[in-house]
Image (cartoon, rainbow, N blue to C red):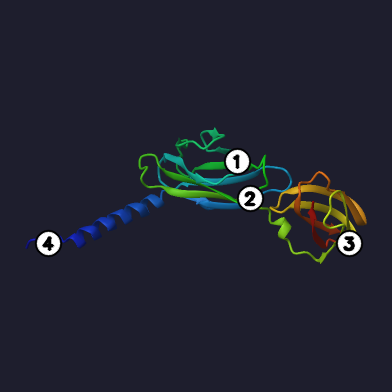
Amino acid sequence: MKKIFTATGIVATVMLLIGSFQFASAQKYSFTPSNHITAPWKTDGTKTEFNMFIKNLTEGSLDLSWKYISSDLQIGWTYQICDNFNCYSTFPDGAKFKSIKKGESAFFIFDIDPVEGAPGKATILLGVYETSNPSQVDTVGFTIEPPSSVEEPASYTAGITPNPATDMITVSAEAALNSLQVFSAVGMKVMEITNTNNTEVQLNVHELPAGVYYIKARDIYGKTVATKFQKF
């Protein structure tokens, strides 16, 4: 009996083979903590760092490469990305990891610093693939967001005078304040005072650019105090 191969049957067979290949490829390595990491900007002046590990799940050595896909980093931000073979101050068109032995991991270490401009949200996408099979690419991502500390719910609202202001402001709270931080509208920390121990704290905002600023403070009882002001 002759076997009859229809177009539909051929397509189905090809798709099945492709699906099997993709499944097998996906089982050769895994990402930790995941293939897309999200983190907030740090507000203490230090760089924000991402760490991603790529574990070899095969029974032998594994050769992987990676390439740049896209990013929306702002002009003036500096960064460095390292794999387990080299470090780069700009994204290369293509790069190779050092060969990964059975049970071991390659890695990405990605440091970013907003030297100029206020930190906003940005996403960097890279592609990871077996060096021998560049057509099968797994997308990995790093997303950085404005600090979440400004959004922390406050126990109560502090008073602030004058508002708007040009030079000096006075922050008034129900209890003595232990610490106070000032953030820009996009979450960058621009001022910090500790051990104030006073219900009224004066701040010189003369050097701040015009705009809206948020104040987050903690009183001696650990309660969060919040307010905002406009600088002319």
Q: Which mark is residue 120?
A: 2
Circle 1 SS class? loop
Q: What secondary structure is marked by label 3?
A: strand
Q: Which of label 3 and label 1 is nearer to you?
A: 1
- What crowding class fits label 1: few (fewer than 14 Cα within 10 Å), some (14-19), or many (20 or more)? few
Give the alpha-carbon distance from disc 1 to disc 2, as whole Å: 12 Å
Label located before the other in sequence (1 or 4): 4
Q: In the current view of this chain or complex, which residue is farthest to the bottom?
A: 156
Mark 4 to mark 2 CA distance (whole Å) = 60 Å
Q: How far across and how far down the image is residue 122, in percent? A: 58, 49
Left or right of 169? Residue 9 is left
Q: Amino acid at mark 4?
A: Ile
Residue at the spot 28% in from the left edge and 55% down from the top edge: 17
Cβ–Cβ under 8 Å for marks 1 and 4? no
Instruction: Identify the image quadrant of residue 134.
Output: top left
Q: Which residue is mark 1?
A: 75
Residue drawn at point x = 55 percent, y = 34 percent: 87
User: Which residue is the site of mark 3?
Assistant: 173
Q: Quadrant of residue 115?
A: top right
Mark closer to the chain start, 4 or 2: 4
Q: Could you tell me which residue is drawn at 52 percent across and 49 percent down? A: 141
* Mark in the foreground, 3 or 4: 3
Which is nearer the N-term, disc 3 or disc 4?
4
Q: Amino acid at mark 1?
A: Ile
Circles 4 and 2, Cβ within 8 Å, touching? The answer is: no
Residue with the mark numbered 4? 4
**Pick the front one: 15 or 216:** 216
- In 3D space, how far apart are the residues under numbered discs 3 and 1 (Cα atoms)? 39 Å
